[in-house]
Image: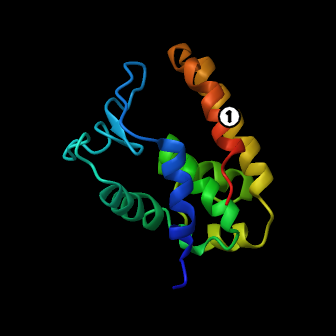
């Protein structure tokens, strides 16, 4: 069986996100496998299965972000991982800034063309770390997550 890009990337996301947590400092609130009650209020988070989490990730992140069109698998994984952690539009806008295309939060043909003609993974990793540092400075109560976020960037690989 040939695995698709999503199938290769999803184990990394699940490893980063872990199991059930309900950290009062996390703005997402109750979370399991990275699926938060805040983002998905209709989902019974405690009863969420890995298979259902994968369905949510495929539909609401991978497909919506048009990640299949990114040829560099490692870059697609970074954008996917950052979209899960910081929101799809944030992840895409960072990608578009470093690709030097119109920043609209949507991966369309122009973004894909620019991304696929460039080597952006290293620049994207750096931009993710800068984003996390800015968040920790802007919202000091989230600083407790900074080391984990930076570690996440360093462990986002196939």
Q: Residues within 10 Å of mark 1 (few under 14, many from 20)?
A: some
Residue 35 in the image: above or below residue 110: above
Image location of residue 62, percent across then percent down: 47, 63
Residue that extends furthest to the top in the rendered view of this protein: 140
Left or right of residue 8: residue 58? left
Q: Residue at x 77, y 72 (%)?
A: 117
| Quarter of the view holding residue 153 | top right
Residue located farthest toward the bottom when viewing the structure as drawn: 1
Give the answer, above or below, for where 131 lies relative to 100.
above
**Which residue was labeled with disc 1?**
150
For the question of whether residue 27 can be seen, the reply is yes
Residue 36 x/y as whole percent: 34, 40
For this rendering, which residue is in front, 40 or 64? 40
Residue at x-position 73% and y-position 52%: 98
- Residue at image x 60%, y 55%? 79
Q: Residue at x 66, y 67 (%)?
A: 73
Is label 1 in a helix, a strand or a loop?
helix
| Foreground pick, 120 / 143 | 143
- Give the side of residue 70 with respect to residue 44, left or right: right
Indicate left or right for 35 with 102 as reference. left
Residue 103 visible in the current orientation: no
Q: Nearer the viewer, residue 1 or 139?
A: 1
Q: Where's residue 127, x and y in %? A: 71, 42
What colour scheme has been applied to the protein in the rendered image? rainbow
Query: Which corner quadrant holds the C terminus?
Result: bottom right
What x and y, as percent, mark residue 103?
60, 54
Q: In which image quadrant can residue 5 be found?
A: bottom right
How many dots with numbers? 1
């Amino acid at each position: 069986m040939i695995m698709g890009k999503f199938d290769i990337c999803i184990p990394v996301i699940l490893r980063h996100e872990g199991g059930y947590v309900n950290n009062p400092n996390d703005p997402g609130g109750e979370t399991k496998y990275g699926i938060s009650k805040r983002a998905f209020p209709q989902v019974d988070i405690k009863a969420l299965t890995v298979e259902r989490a994968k369905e949510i990730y495929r539909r609401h992140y991978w497909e919506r972000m048009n990640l299949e069109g990114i040829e560099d698998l490692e870059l697609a994984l970074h954008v996917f991982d950052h979209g899960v952690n910081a929101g799809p539009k944030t992840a895409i806008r960072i990608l578009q800034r470093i690709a030097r295309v119109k920043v609209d939060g949507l991966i369309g043909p122009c973004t894909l063309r620019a991304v696929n003609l460039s080597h952006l993974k290293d620049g994207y990793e750096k931009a993710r770390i800068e984003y996390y540092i800015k968040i920790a400075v802007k919202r000091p109560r989230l600083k407790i997550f900074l080391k984990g976020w930076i570690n996440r960037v360093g462990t986002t690989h196939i």
